[in-house]
């Protein structure tokens, strides 16, 4: 619809391709062949959950009860809900039209250790203004944890033939959360001023410390609580002139620079993707 065209696959309710009129390259990272998604995909374009990101030591306490979930990251922690999480399964299409598609799945009670039957739906919509809308909804039959995430990797220049380090990034955040060796927040909330994490004004993602590119994968803190829908980040391609604006109701936004996404799978450009091919 409008200047955008999207291709959605049922594996992980993933955006496999996203194109804009007048721009020859894809805007997202995706594999050419479906078989590479179940075998190799680092959640390209998928919905991650039921709990996205990491749960330390693969255990949490809810209403006084300890739950132990699958330790599928480093053999210690839980990542994106486990090896059979929402991004690693086939969803069902429950509705579609010229400008939208809705997919749904069930995360069953006890699955990978999580409580509650969680019915999840994802609707992708394109409007005439060139806006991609992702609407996620979840309903449970008992108290549970739920932290859903859309996991597209974007490259606004060449579809991933090159890296995104010269893209210009702005994040509306005065603080960030440092992470430990497991990429889990270490409990500190630090000001971005004077650090590699200061994106309050547009600047390149490229930033070296001790001769190495900073490998961004952290949460940036905007407010202390949820609020009305508001801008949280903007990215501009280094050469294309394309700009991506992101809005959220949440208090923070996660920025990941594609540090570990390289593999031998053939991408939408006909070549494998390298490190930092998308953000």
Image (cartoon, rainbow, N blue to C red):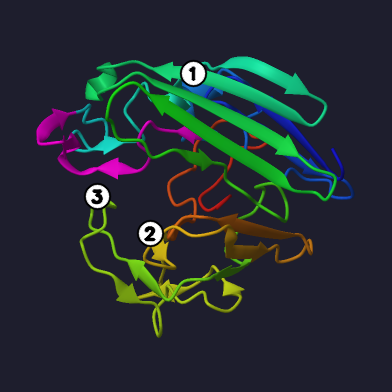
Q: Is residue 82 above or below residue 159?
A: above
Residue nearer the viewer, 225 or 19: 225
* Circle 1 residue: 105
Q: On the image, which quarter does residue 48 sit in?
A: top left
Which range is magenta? 47-68
Q: Residues within 10 Å of mark 2 (few under 14, many from 20)?
A: some
User: Which residue appears at 69% of the width and 25% of the height?
Assistant: 101
Residue nearer the viewer, 36 or 174: 174
The verdict on residue 56 being magenta is yes
Q: Residues within 10 Å of mark 1 (few under 14, many from 20)?
A: many
Q: Is residue 44 visible?
A: no
Q: Is residue 52 above or below residue 71?
A: below
Dot 2 or dot 1: first in sequence order is 1
* Circle 3 residue: 182
- Quarter occupied by the N terminus: top right
Disc 3 is placed on an element classified as: loop
- Please name which of the two marks, 3 or 1, marks the residue nearer to the observer: 1
User: Which residue appears at 66% of the width and 34% of the height?
Assistant: 124
- Rendered image: mark on residue 173: none
User: Which residue appears at 49% of the width and 18% of the height?
Assistant: 105
Q: CA distance from mark 3 to mark 2?
A: 12 Å
Where residue 55 appears, as percent x and y from the top left, is: 24, 41
Dot 3 or dot 2: first in sequence order is 3
* Circle 2 residue: 218
């Amino acid at each position: 619809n409008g200047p955008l065209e999207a291709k959605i696959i049922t594996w992980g309710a993933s955006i496999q391709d996203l194109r804009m009129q007048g721009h020859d390259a894809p805007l997202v990272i995706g594999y050419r062949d479906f078989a590479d998604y179940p075998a190799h995909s680092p959640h390209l374009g998928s919905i991650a959950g039921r709990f996205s990101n990491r749960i330390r030591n693969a255990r949490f306490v809810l209403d006084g009860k300890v739950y132990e979930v699958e330790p599928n990251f480093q053999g210690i922690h839980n990542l994106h809900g486990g090896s059979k999480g929402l991004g690693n399964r086939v969803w069902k299409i429950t509705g579609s039209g010229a400008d939208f598609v809705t997919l749904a799945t069930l995360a069953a009670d006890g699955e990978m250790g999580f409580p509650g039957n969680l019915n999840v739906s994802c609707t992708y919509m394109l409007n005439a203004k060139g806006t991609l809308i992702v609407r996620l909804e979840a309903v449970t039959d008992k108290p549970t944890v739920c932290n859903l995430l859309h996991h597209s990797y974007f490259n606004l220049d060449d579809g991933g033939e090159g890296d995104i380090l010269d893209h210009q990034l702005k994040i509306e955040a005065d603080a960030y959360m440092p992470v430990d060796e497991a990429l889990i927040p270490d409990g500190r909330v630090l000001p971005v001023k004077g650090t590699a994490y200061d994106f309050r004004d547009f600047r390149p993602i490229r930033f070296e410390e001790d001769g190495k590119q900073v490998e961004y994968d952290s949460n940036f803190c905007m407010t202390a609580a949820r609020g009305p829908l508001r801008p949280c980040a903007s990215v501009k391609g280094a050469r294309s002139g394309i700009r991506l604006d992101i809005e959220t109701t949440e208090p923070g936004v996660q920025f990941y620079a594609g540090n570990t996404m390289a593999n031998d799978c053939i991408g939408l450009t006909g070549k494998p993707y390298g490190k930092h091919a998308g953000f």
